[in-house]
Structures are given as C-alpha cells and as structure tokens.
Image (tube, helix red, strand yellow):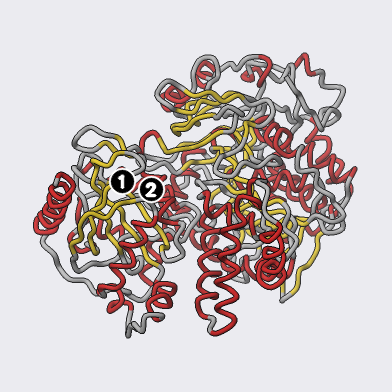
Amino acid sequence: MLTRNLQKNSIPRSIATKDLPWNLMGGPLLPLPPIFVALRPYNSMEYSDPQTMNYGTLPSRLLTVIDKLPNPRAQMVRRSGRWDPISSQEFLRRVAGLSTAFVELGVKPGDRVGLFSANRPEWHTTDFAITGAGGVTVPVYFQESADRMTYILKHCGAKVVFVAGAPQLQKLLAVRGELPELEQIIVADAGPDVPTDCLRYETLIAGASAADVSSYRLRASQVLTGQLASLIYTSGTTGEPKGVMLTHSNFCSNVTDLGDDFRLDPKNDVALSFLPLAHVYGRTLDYIYIFQGAALAYVESVDAVAQALLEVRPTVTAAVPRFFEKIYARLVEQGSRNTGIKRKLFDWAMKIAQQAIPWRATGVPASAVLKVQWKLANALVYKKIRLGTGGRLRIISSGGAPLSKALAEFFWTVGIPIYQGYGLTETSPIVSSNYPHNRIGSSGKPIANVQVRIAEDGEILVKGPCVMQGYYKNPEATAEVLSDDGWFRTGDIGYLDKDNYLYITDRKKDLLKTAAGKFVAPQPIENALKTSPYILNAMVVGDKRKFIVALIVPNPVTVSAKLAEQGIKFASNQEMAAHRAVHALMASLVQSRRFTLSARALSSLRAVFSADRADEDETAATIRTILRETGRLIDPHTAVGVAVAEKETRDPSIPMVVLSTAHPAKFPDAVEAATGVRPPLPEWLANLDRRPERVTTLPVDQMAVERHILSASRAAHEGAAA
C-alpha cells in the first residue's frame, strides 16, 4: 500500500507515536462520551490507526508551510476596490493572538467553538486559532436560518462563537437567549453597533506578539492527530441535522492523499475560495491550497466570483456543477444576442467544439482539417471564453453534485479543464478524483489509501483514514452507516469500471419506484435535461405513481432569445409561459435528450422550485422525500405545462410527465398547501419573495389536474400499444 506523509516532523519527537492512545477517552482532548467510543468503527490498522500513519494536525501543517514556504500574499481580500495581501507571518500573528484569546476565555481541548462567517481571511484565522488551542471548530453557514443555527449551536454545546459581519451578528443576537451554554461572542467587522458584552476581534489581535506565536506553537504541538477537529452538521432531507465528527487525521489524510498530486507552486499559483467554508468540500480544498503555500483569494458572495476571476486570475479553484451550468448558459445567452457575422462565427465555433470533443476531451485522434478549424475557433472564440475566467485556470475541481458529461466535454474542448470528484461530509470529503488522469463522465479513481467497493444492491462503500468517527450524540445513526470493520455506507448507487474509475448513478434513497414496481433513477434524467442552455433546472419525482414527473425551470432569457429568431416576442414572462411555442420548445428538448414524447396536455401554471444555489441536490431530495411520504403529486397552484413522455434509456413502459415552469416562485408555501408538510429547505428560498412574480397564478382543482395527467398518460399508453 502506498503511504504518503508530507508531515513527518509535524508532531514533536517528544510525543512518541507508539504512545498515542487508540481509545482516545484516556485524556481530556475528545468531547466524546464513552458510548461513541464503543460504537466507533475500528478500521483496519493499515488505514486509520494513528500508530501506523501520521498525517499531522491542522495547526502543525499550517506552521510547517509558514516556516518552509512563506508567502507575502498568503491571503488576499478585496477592500475598497483592490485586493489587499496578508503575509504568512501576519496570518500566523493573527491566528496566535486569537488563539490566546480563546484560551483566556476558557476554551479547553475538546470544547466546541462556533464559527459563523462567510469566506474571508477571518474564517481560517479563527479555524486555526480554535484547533491550535485543541478546540473543535463548528462551522455555521453564513446565510443559515435562525432555527437551524440555533439547533447546531445548542446541540454541540458551543461555549464561544466567532461571528463576522453585522447581518450575522444580528441574527446570532436574536437567538442568544436560546443558547444557555454560550458564554462569549467574538465579532469581526460588525460596524459601530456592537453590544458591549461582545468582544471585538480587531482588538483581540491588535496586540498579538512573538510571545503569542511561541505559545501557539507549544499548544499546537500538544494536539494529537486522532483528536476531534470539527463538527460539521449535514443537511439531510428529513429530521434534524447530524454532526459529523472529523479528526485532524481525517482532514489531513484527505489533504495529503488527494493534494499530493496538485503540486502547487507558491510563487505562481493563486487559488480562489468561494465555496462555503462551512461545508467540507470547499474547506478541505482550501486546506490543500494553504498547506502547499499558494496564495488564497477570498470571495464572500457568489455574485462577486465573475469579477474576482478577472481580477485575481486564479490558477486553481473548486466549484459545483451549477457554477459551470451558469457559465455555459450565460455564454449561450450572450452568443444568441449577436447578429450578423458575429452570430455566424459563434455558431460555427460551437459546432467545431462539438466535433472536437472526441479529440480534445478523450484523446481520440483528429483529422488535420478539424485541428486547423479548432485552432482558428480557439483564436477567435475559445480564447475569449477562457479570458472570462481569468485565462490561467489549470486545475478546476468539481464536486458536490454530478457534473453532466456533455458539459464537462464542452469545457475541456475549449481549454477549461474540469476534474470531477466524489465524496461526502462523512469522508472528509474526497473519496475519488479524476486528477490528474481524467476520464470524463466518471468521478475518478479512489484516492490513495482509500478503498471503495460496491455492495450487492449497488451501494458504494468506503473505507479509509478519511472516514468520520461517527455522528455526534447520535449512536443510532452512526451504527446505521458504519460497519464494525470500518466500512461507510454512502447511500449512493454506482459502479467501478475495469480501470477502477468510479461512476455515480443516483442516491439510493432517491430511486423512484413506480406503481408497477419498476425503479427509475432521477438524477440521470435531471442531468440530461439540465445540459440544455434553455433549462435552468429540472427535478424528477413520481414515487408510487404510474408515471414520473419532471419539473422543469426554463431560462426566460435564452428561451426568449431563441423564439425571437422565429419572430415571436413576449411582453412579459407570463405571456411567455403560456405560449405554445415555449411548450413546443420544451417538448423538443425532452426529445433531444433521448426521451420520447408521447402526448401533451396544458394547464395554467406557476413556478415550482429554484436551484440557484450549490445545495440544489439537497433541495430536490427534500422535495422528493415530501412527495413520497405524503403521496401527493403537485399543488394545484403550482401546476405547469404538462407533457407525457417515455424514457428510452431505462424502461420504455414508464411514462414521464414533464412540467415546465417560467421561473422560481414560492415553493415552500406550495408544498405545504399540497401536502400539509412544510419543507425544511434552506433559508434562501424565502428570499424568492423579493423577486418579481414571473407567472400568473390561476387556481386549479387538484383532482382535475391529476385526472388531466392520468388521461394524458393513458392516451400515451394506448398510443404506444397501438
């Protein structure tokens, strides 16, 4: 077995690894009650036993890179229209000063400390300050709902919370009375209106000195690799969030076993951080960038990413598929606005990109003519596309959801390399990666020291040093997913090909079972539909039904531009949603993605859901769960244009109803009205109220809608039989 260790000297020689406790209850460093140790999986010695593998700790890895690879712009943040650098030494001074403050506030090894902030330098400063003191970082998403934030901080028993930004501070203060264990709040960049009982971050770090740095180094040397580093609360689709327990070894093994291949150059590489650091994906990738000495530029809002790409010109970054889908949709939208020779040139370049996919994306030999055409298209069009991302990206990691093969092929063809990977919060998170040997359509090979196998029912099982220790205060949930010999049940369905590349086909719990007892995997259908620039999002439901239903959110900008070519213009989105040409376009998109349209029926509809965010899969899974458990199909007030189709790729006997919407609207209210259950969706859905209504709402009788759909479905079956 290949074992790579970048940090052989990260643990002091005075602490002999042979003396490290396997049953970590022997010291005060872990806040785990004995019951969790009893349920904790004892992975085989070759994988996770700290006696045989030492990956270091988060603070030790930070100190190593600062000492060996100091960077004058270790952190970069945009202020007053310019990017200000923070050197490695200043970064360490701030970390040490804040860590001293935590210790003086009574934070002891094993104590949980909340971190409520967007992506900014203070996030990592606080994280390393907490873990360097032996504490446990409990991140809270910076736009988290008040209820969910309260649950997380109460469940983990946070004694101290660090918060950055005035909006976040006000949200925390509003629920402080519900957090009996919270003793102190440290606040950064919150303006003048800060309560006197809160401590200001700026004041705490102002006087940090060399003595604080020395004390930090000493405390960091006493942190053990098997010690709890963080509790990350997973969303889930039902029930309360679960706190995933990740140790220093969990994080650092992932950083080493994946990051070794990155080989970043501190002098030239610049990373862009915009995935929420409260989620493990962005957090672990940022650790890789930091521990390899690259400059790290922070972007607080996804709306600022486009500008940051142009200004920072990063060489590495990580994103979710939705990010690439938006880039592609924007590209097509801009191209569709061109006229004359510019439009012809754009259309020609897109055609050449499609023809060049086998060559550029998979290495299949191409003709001399195609190579010349590609070079010309590259000079005239593709180069401009790359310049829109800064022009220097060489490693783009994609995760968090499946990336459609067609989208990946397009970006590779125009010179933007996207490497799809796979993982979960419970695996710290990376299980497999396509870097550096990419196979488009797969999630890559398992990373070093991680084993993957497929269960008899197709579920993906994972074992390795990245696998979590369990769910905090939840032994029952832990026992459900962790076997006695250390295998983690991911809940995902997939397979390994002959070359050991992993392919994800769906979530086990999201498989739809029709009334006829046949299974349908919704994600491949959704991904196929979402590759169209005319579709913003798609979601498939239909468990225990005679048919499956796809809720489609068209892109009003690209759809309007497309139909304008036919001389069709709309005075409003309401008019567009009701137009037959739009329904025909949606039908053609369904057909073009290997679905056979069998019949069509129309209703007055309103939008159903939105997926403008990285957690779109969570939203879709939540909706599916509610619909499955309540047995209701759709709310009468959220009905959309209907089309019945048959799925060629899996089982032609299963009809599919396609519901197309004009734009997102008030989905939580609609689901509650239809099912009696209020969906536990992210708070961002509430913000949709601020958007203008895109479609008129007409009351439709629920039974009439379902009779209409069933009638269309029956007609489709009769037509197929004939």
Q: Quadrant of residue 232?
A: top right
Find disc 1 in the rendering and name its residue.
647
The amino acid sitting under disc 2 is: Ile
Residue contact at pointers 2 and 1, CB within 8 angstroms: yes
Residue depicted at 27% across the width and 36% down the height: 513
Q: Is residue 202 left or right of residue 572?
A: right
How far is mark 2 from mark 1, CA to CA? 9 Å
Q: Nearer the viewer, residue 401 or 17?
A: 401
Q: 367 or 438: nearer the eye?
A: 367
Is residue 100 visible from the viewing direction of this image?
Answer: yes
Disc nearer the start of the sequence (2/1): 2
Question: Could you tell me the amino acid type at mark 1?
Answer: Lys
Which residue: 32% across, 74% down?
Answer: 694
Q: Residue at x 35, y 69 (%)?
A: 689
**Residue 111 visible, this orientation:** no
Residue situated in front as seen by the camera: 419 or 375: 375
